[in-house]
Amino acid sequence: MLVSAIGADPHSPLRYFKAKGDTEAAIAALYYDSLQIAHPFLIIGERGDSRPVERSAAWLFDRIASRRLSRFQPSDGKQIATVMIEKAQLPIPNQPTVYRYHPQEFQAPRTR
């Protein structure tokens, strides 16, 4: 299991997304029976450090939520962990497989 980022791509011109894509490719090359990769947009929740830009982005996306932007909604770290644990308990296929999970799969139902 690997938590990466939406937009991860080893060919990306942006360093962050290139690094995430390179990491995914390197781990996939290890030939595990099953590799599960989470692609959250923005992880929110309790952290040991201050991240004002991420907090501001999460606030902004929460306020302008729409169907067109639904894949770019912040996901709570605990929700991501819960979904990944559930996915890890699924049967492993007979051949090596890479599963990629996208932000919509980590979003808790909205209460507003």
Image: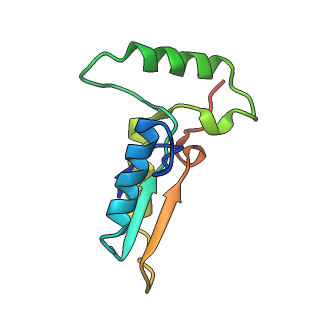
Q: Position of residue 84 (x, y in %)?
A: 41, 54
Q: Position of residue 42 (x, y in %)?
A: 48, 32
Q: Position of residue 45 (x, y in %)?
A: 39, 27
Residue plotted at (65% across, 17% down)? 63
Say left or right for 87 vs 47. right
Residue extending farthest left: 48
Say left or right for 64 vs 43. right
Quarter occupied by residue 62: top right
Residue extending farthest right: 67
Query: Where is the N terminus found, in terms of image quarters?
Result: bottom left
Residue 4 can be seen in this image:
no
| Residue 94 versus residue 41 in the image, above or below | below
Residue nearest the viewer, comparing 44 with 72: 72
| Residue 80 versus residue 42 in the image, above or below | below
Residue plotted at (52% across, 54% down)? 101
| Residue 16 versus residue 90 in the image, above or below | above
